[in-house]
Image: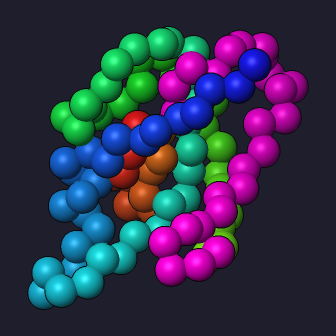
């Protein structure tokens, strides 16, 4: 069974993607964190409740409003149900949860 994930953009993440002139958005998503705690979050979240693994990602633009991110959780370290996901910017800021 799969569940649709609807990321919540964090306040810190939104602030981090604006450039100094506040006339463009710029961000590089570099990591995804995976955890096993099911909970309801909001834009003030700062981390997962129970992070299990953090993986590097690469991405490509699909169209004007969509990107594909690719990362591999190979499952060799441990097994768990993924119930929470974080998206981190290259500077370490939590963009979305």
> Which residue is found at the position 72% from the left and 50% from the top?
71
Spot the residue most to the left.
21
Residue at (14% x, 81% y) in the render = 22
68 versus 72 height, above or below:
below
In this rendering, position of residue 86 left or right of residue 42: right
Q: Is residue 97 above or below residue 79?
A: below
Query: Residue 79 in magenta?
Result: yes
User: Magenta span has 34?
Assistant: no
Q: Magenta residues?
A: 62-85
Compared with residue 6, is residue 34 higher up or lower down, i.e. above or below? above
Instruction: Name the one closer to the observer, 3 or 9.
Output: 3
From this viewpoint, is residue 96 visible?
A: yes
Could you tell me which residue is drawn at 71 percent across and 13 percent down? 80
Where's residue 82, x and y in %?
A: 64, 22
* In the depicted structure, whether residue 78 falls above or below residue 12: above
Query: Residue at position x 43%, y 41% from top?
Result: 7
- Majority SS type along the magenta span: loop
Identify the image quadrant of residue 17: bottom left
Measured as percent of width and height from the top left, residue 69 is found at 65, 58
Q: Which residue is at the front of the view, 31 or 18?
A: 18
Which color mode does the image show? rainbow
């Amino acid at each position: 069974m799969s569940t649709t994930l609807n990321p919540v953009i964090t306040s810190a993440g939104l602030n981090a993607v604006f450039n100094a002139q506040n006339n463009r958005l710029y961000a590089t998503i570099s990591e995804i964190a995976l955890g096993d705690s099911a909970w309801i979050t909001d834009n003030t979240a700062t981390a997962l409740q129970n992070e299990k693994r953090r993986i590097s990602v690469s991405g490509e633009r699909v169209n004007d409003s969509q990107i594909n991110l690719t990362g591999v959780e190979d499952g060799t370290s441990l097994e768990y149900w993924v119930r929470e996901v974080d998206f981190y910017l290259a500077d370490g800021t939590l963009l979305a949860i």
